[in-house]
Amino acid sequence: MNSAKTKSRSPRGFLPRPLLRAGETITPPPYTQKNCGGAHHFKFRFLDLCIRFGKVILKVCECPKFAAKWCGVKILPPQLVKQYNMNKSFAKILSEVELLLDGYTRELRTSVQPYKYKIKVEMSPNYVYSPSDEDIRESLVEHVGVLPILATYFHQYVTEPVNLGKALEMLAIHDIGEIIVGDKSVFLKQQDESEDETREALKILPVKQHSPYLEFKELKTNEAKFARSIDKIAPDIFDLLCPADLTVKRLKYFAHLEAKDIVDTVEKIKSPYMGWSVFFKEFHASVISRLREILEEYG
């Protein structure tokens, strides 16, 4: 028989015939006894079976459809499996986003949102401001939303090199700890309270955002200094946009400051965050000067 022309009888059609050695036929040799002279035939036959089995395993791994049919298991098409897993992930992500937005929205800061005040007065012309009135207080989500607007605008005036995208990431996450510990006036916040906020923030943030968060706290880069300047100057700008009596009442209630001490205290606490940049140093000095004029007129 011409073995080269013999068709394979493999049940699946993909297994090759065993390689034949010189003088060997397609029919396997009889099972040999231990220590008999034909032991080498048994060794090669066993090796052949191992090769066959290895190719079956390879085929199963490479072809899911064959594996399912061979094992009698029904499997989902790859696109449906991927869609199912993604749907589970999206549900979890949406839940986490909802918690974040709820926390940012519910947490109220000690500052007044000037445009909320204007709307309040338009709707109630006889409205008289009280620091306990939550309707016009700035929410954390409004604060975090305002900062990128100011940062993007002021960036054009800063001559020092600043990666705006990196600074915007810091501004987006820098107050996330307040969702847990709440907001406290910068004029009263103690070191241990800042540490509590940092600890809670790191619990919420993904690990890859720990670095920009801590960079913002440490103030060693221009991006961190730029972001901190924006964060500190925003409430001062709001005070310029609000009537003087709101600023006086607000800072007396939340920071225990008398009207005569407001400007000097604001300048003392916030000016150090502006000195790294020529623009911020001069601009903040202008804001302080204007605030002083307004409060002197009020007093």
Image (tube, rainbow, N blue to C red):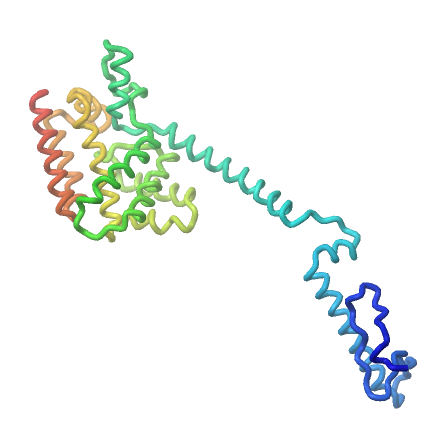
Q: Position of residue 92 (x, y in %)?
A: 53, 39
Residue toward you, 76 or 88: 76
How many tags in the picture? 0
Residue 115 appears left or right of 159: right
- Work out which quarter of the rendered image holds the N terminus and state it: bottom right
Q: In the picture shown, does residue 225 fall above or below 44? A: above
Residue 230 appears left or right of 33: left
Q: Position of residue 205 (x, y in %)?
A: 41, 44
- What residue appears at the point 24 percent right and 24 percent down from the top-left corner? 114
Residue 238 appears left or right of 41: left
Q: In the picture shown, does residue 218 fall above or below 189? A: below
Residue 270 appears left or right of 212: left
- Work out which quarter of the rendered image holds the C terminus and state it: top left
Q: Quadrant of residue 141?
A: top left
- What residue appears at the point 64 percent right and 50 percent down from the top-left corner? 78
Q: Position of residue 284 (x, y in %)?
A: 14, 38
Q: Position of residue 247 (x, y in %)?
A: 18, 24
- What residue appears at the point 33 percent right and 28 percent down from the top-left corner? 139
- What residue appears at the point 16 percent right and 20 percent down from the top-left corner? 245
Residue toward you, 171 or 220: 171
Residue furthest to the top: 126
